[in-house]
Image: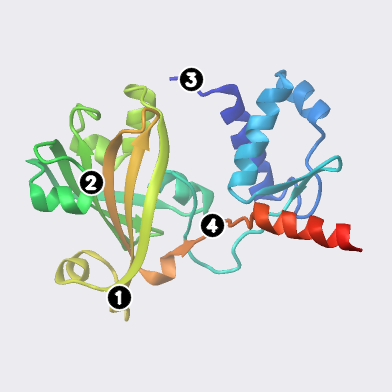
Amino acid sequence: MPKSKFEQIYKELKQDIESGTLAYESLIPSENQLVVRFDCSRNTVRRAIAMLAEEGYVQPMHGRGVRIIYQPSSQDNFTIGGVESFGESAARNHRETSTRVVRFAEITADERISARTGFKVGTELYYIQRVRSLDGAAVVFDINLFDRELVPGLTEEICTESIYRYIEETLGMPIVMSKRTITVERATPVDIVNLDLDDYDCLAVVNSQTFNSEGVQFEFNQSRRRPDFFCFQTTATRRRKPSDAGAADDELLSD
């Protein structure tokens, strides 16, 4: 399935920023330059820039351009970003990766699974356990559940490569949004058997519910990560409350 034009622009600019081709605190090319470069409309460029701003790569400045605010993590670890596959994260972090499928089964969601994952009772699911290695070390234990109706035809071979690529390119289903909860938990006997934990006795655990463009959940994932191969970056924006703006206006009027 071909990507939208704004997604192509977003990915190319993001790559330029991450590689340093577009440097920290510099301005990205003007809107007019980007329109010519990508042979597209202004609205298409603006959508791509909005995505970059949403992820903390750039800061639009009214009437002054768009400044790059992204800096690579100073830690020698594995930084996870937006809704991306393990392989995409590894490539962005310049890591060598491999995947081993530990378990591949078909199950039906009961009340316990439903309460934990968000899938309705009775939903037919693929249940997958995978060990993910970075630079030769087994550092991530992934547990995935996929709605079999929305993600039909999964195989162990697909699971060792890229499930997200299969979903987007073969099934043509857009992957849009993921809700995440991040905790720190003690390593379980299963973790100890499957991962190269070194001296660590705890893991960073990311629970995710992922949705398609129709707002329907198609995946639940629990990703159990060795701490030194985990860094989560996010961007927060402080919005001014209407009441604050009103108070400021009152102060101006009283002068």
From mark 2 to mark 4, how far is it between C-alphas?
Answer: 24 Å
Q: Please indicate whether residue 12 sits to the left or right of residue 110 in the image.
A: right
From mark 1 to mark 3, how far is it between C-alphas?
Answer: 41 Å
Find numbered disc 2 in the image and state the secondary structure of the residue it sits on. Answer: loop
User: Of the residues under marks 3 and 4, which one precedes in the sequence?
Assistant: 3
- Mark identifier at residue 234: 4
Find numbered disc 3 in the image and state the secondary structure of the residue it sits on. Answer: loop
Q: Position of residue 42 (x, y in %)?
A: 73, 23
Q: Amino acid at mark 4?
A: Thr
Q: Amino acid at mark 1?
A: Cys
Residue where numbered disc 3 is placed: 2
User: Of the residues under marks 4 and 1, which one precedes in the sequence?
Assistant: 1
What residue is rendered at 21% in x and 32% in y? 154
Q: Quadrant of residue 161?
A: top left
Residue where numbered disc 2 is placed: 118
Give the farthest residue toward the right: 255
The residue closer to the viewer here, 115 or 162, is 115
From mark 3 to mark 4, how far is it between C-alphas?
Answer: 28 Å
Q: Please indicate whether residue 78 sits to the left or right of residue 73 in the image.
A: left
Q: Position of residue 149 (x, y in %)?
A: 19, 27
139 over 15 or under it: above or below: below
228 over 145 or under it: above or below: below
Q: Please indicate whether residue 117 sits to the left or right of residue 240 in the image.
A: left
- Mark identifier at residue 202: 1
Figure quadrant of the N terminus: top left
Answer whether residue 234 is visible to the viewer in this image: yes
Q: Amino acid at mark 2?
A: Gly
Q: Position of residue 119 (x, y in %)?
A: 20, 42
